[in-house]
Amino acid sequence: MDNVLEVRNLSKSFPGFQLKDVSFTLPKGYIMGLIGPNGSGKTTTIKLILNMLRRDGGAVKILGMDNIADEKAVKEELAVVFDSNYFCGDWTVAQTETAVSGFYKKWNAERFHQLLKRFGIDPAKKVKDLSRGMQMKLMLACAFSYGAKLLILDEPTSGLDPVSRDELLTVLSEYIEDGERSVLFSTHITGDLERAADYITYINCGSLFFTGGKDEFVDSFRIVKGGLNDLTGELRKRLIGLRTHPTGFEALMRTEELENLRRTGRGGRMAGGTAADDLTVEPATIDEIVVFTSKTGTF
């Protein structure tokens, strides 16, 4: 079994929104970033994977097991950390361990207390008295203490300070070191993904825009800038999320389209007079790709 997670043609309809035939796979030993604007379908996808929503179509397999038919066995291998604390605030950290450990046959108390020590969490302290960052670390300590093979994170770095975010990313890198465990990491902070992710799955307006290697995703696009005189009708057809201002324009362009423009330029200019050499071309970040493609809903 090479994949920890397999999602095939996943679909779910709500009034005013539809998740349509989303498919992706996450191999063992890697981190995948799940990205998209608010309302794009990321959380719906995660809830369907966790069987928190009833799917309309498709299939989800975790370690080769169906997430519905084999739900009990699946959840022994699955750990989840959401963007807010889900433990009882009046429990102490020690009481939290007592409550959580009973659900998992492979609970490792020694590992849990090692993580508490590493994260600087006092077992006698009440959950509600921990800072947001410390609550996140407590959820991670629980998630890492029963040998789960798949960790799903839904906006875990939202609201964390840079030091806590850096520590989280370090912990995630350590988590997958054995090559047997993987992370599905939903976040709006794409800088974290540029550092940590191996794969990207991008959902926009309920549909799959891209799934594959992070480097492939970033290399597929460029930021293009030029003067208003360069903005011909032919060029406009190739641009994504066009922004104009008094002195020029900027937009996203697929790298393949840019190469086609360059080849056209060697034999003459495009209709209207624009050639690739007239344009300023820069690498695109994950954040810029999401912003420009979301602006127009371009697929």
Image (cartoon, helix red, strand yellow):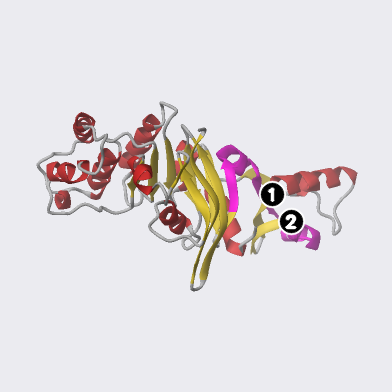
Note whether 184 is above or below 22 in the view shown. Answer: above
Q: Amino acid at mark 2?
A: Arg
Q: Answer with the quarter of the image where residue 239 lies.
A: bottom right
Label annotation for residue 243: none
Q: Is residue 124 left or right of residue 107?
A: left
Q: Nearer the viewer, residue 242 or 92?
A: 92
Residue 212: horizontal and vertical position, in percent? 58, 42
| N-terminal label among 2 and 1 | 2
Residues marked 2 and 1 touching at CB (< 8 Å): yes
Q: Which residue is found at the position 51% from the left and 51% from the top? A: 59
Q: Is residue 133 left or right of residue 236?
A: left
Q: Which residue is found at the position 12% from the left and 46% from the top? A: 92
Q: What is the magenta range?
A: 209-238
Q: Is residue 142 left or right of residue 196?
A: left
Q: Nearer the viewer, residue 92 or 244?
A: 92
Q: Is residue 231 magenta?
A: yes
Label annotation for residue 238: 2
Number of numbered discs overlaid on the protein picture: 2
Residue matched to label 1: 254
Residue 274: horizontal and vertical position, in percent? 81, 54
Q: Which residue is found at the position 49% from the left and 73% from the top? A: 15
Residue 94: horizontal and vertical position, in percent? 13, 41
Residue 286, visible in the rendered structure:
no
Q: Which residue is found at the position 66% from the left and 57% from the top? A: 240
